[in-house]
Image (cartoon, helix red, strand yellow):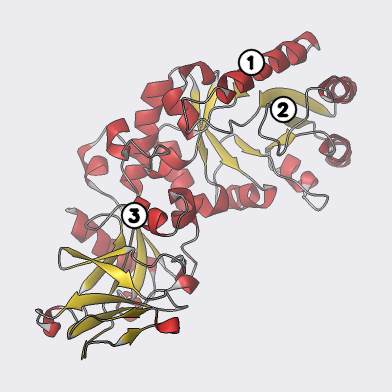
Amino acid sequence: MNSEALEESNLTNSTSSAQATGFERRAVIDLSAIRNNVKQISDVVAPAAVMAVVKADAYGHGAIQVAKAALEGGARWIGCAHVTEALALREAGIDAPMLAWLHTEDTPFEAAIDAGLDLGVSGWELERVAAAARAVQTPARIHIKVDTGLGRNGSTMEALPDLLNRASDFQEEGLLRAVGIFSHLAVADEPERPETDEQLAVFNTAIELIEAAGFDLEVRHIANTPGILSRPDSHYEMVRLGLGLYGLSPFEEDTPQSFGLRPAMTVKTRVANVKKVRPGQGVSYGLNYKTEGETYLGLIPMGYADGLPRIATGAPVTVNGRTYPVRGRIAMDQCVIDLGADINPEDFLGAEAIIFGDGGQSVNTWAYAANTINYEVVTRISPRVPRYYIEGSWGEAGE
């Protein structure tokens, strides 16, 4: 079955009324690309394990579907920011090893331990995790997080000895097992900067401390996607694959294809209206753009409520194989492209309009227009845009 046929079949299966939902707007997620990306990275980091990071609804791609595809592609762990994200995956039947690391006092630690989740611990959470383990009569599995220079979560090196002493007491009591140590790289997407060397040196010192304290570590992990691709010395026993899982590059000068990665998301809609206007016609709020001559304007029924950055004036929309920049401000539900004077409007009304992805421009072009990063553009595509899942040629060809 070809990709288009698979897509149409998937549309039928994804909604009770595919005809009614139609092609108004959608984010098409190629799950075969997810599998491909895991396989490519697994080959790079072997024998280290790959953790597929599916926080934030898998960067907007759909956490349950992506987690399943990633495991099929060879990932051995799943990573989430919040326990509630991980619990939803457990409820969906995903039983792979899973880590959640960003907590508050309201985090459901008891449910997490009951569900067999590993928990990241930076310091203050330790007593609450131990209390939850005591309540459910099950030892917690923890990964101690160390702040090696990013300045967010994680124990400082100064506080680490005390944290290890407390963790050791709870481990002797049978309330937990410290099975991992991890940290996060700050500037690995800028390989020339010296801070990554400094962070790895701190991380290695932290490893020595935790091992000297008598903990039997199963995994050490610090590498994110840029670390995976630029710093083999950061791989240890496991890497955390985030952006690369979705087929995107963390480096401005390198395309995903240069690493064997395939972008998984395509966002598209249909041209909602085409009309001929006079010279000097203002476009959208503020009238910051005015047509230079007689032209046709195309209305794109997606705006910032759908996740398109409001400031991304000039971002590309591809229609009938040609790319047109967004003119004027992006509004809540819509934006406008200038199609030029020499068109047949009947060829454009109802035509497919690709925001980014397969058949259109890279998501990076939207990131540049919005002065942001590709991570943000895909993650912010809103729930108002239905996700449809297809299988592309990689899945059909086999491994």
- Foreground label between 2 and 3: 3
- Going 51% across and 16% down the picture, which residue do you hit? 233
N-terminal of the pair, mark 2 or mark 3, is: 2
Which of the two residues, 238 or 11, is positioned nearer the viewer here?
238
Identify the secondary structure beneath mark 1.
helix
Q: Amino acid at mark 2?
A: Val
Q: Is residue 298 above or below residue 367?
A: below
**Contact, CB < 8 Å: mark 3 with mark 1?**
no
Do we see residue 281 in this rendering?
yes
Above-or-below relation of 298 to 14: below
Which mark, residue 201? Answer: 1
Quadrant occupied by the C terminus: top left
Q: Amino acid at mark 3?
A: Thr
Name the residue nearer the viewer: 225 or 22: 225
Q: Where's residue 111, x and y in %?
A: 75, 47
**Label 1 neighbour load within 10 Å: few <14, some 14-19, many 20+:** few
Callouts 2 and 3 close, C-beta under 8 Å:
no
Residue pointed to by mark 2 = 146
Foreground mark, 1 or 2, reads 1
> Mark 3 = which residue?
365
Q: Quadrant of residue 39?
A: top left
Nearest to N terminus: mark 3 or mark 1? 1
Q: Is residue 241 left or right of residue 72?
A: right
Q: Distance of mark 2 from mark 3, alpha carbons? A: 35 Å
What amino acid does circle 1 point to? Ala
The answer to whether residue 217 is visible is: no
- Give the residue drawn at x 57%, y 19%: 197
User: What residue appears at the point 29 percent right and 78 percent down from the top-left corner?
Assistant: 19
Q: Position of residue 378 (x, y in %)?
A: 44, 55
Q: Residues within 10 Å of mark 2 (few under 14, many from 20)?
A: many
Camera-side residue of 148 and 293: 293
Mark 3, Cα crowd under 10 Å, few <14 / some 14-19 / many 20+, is some
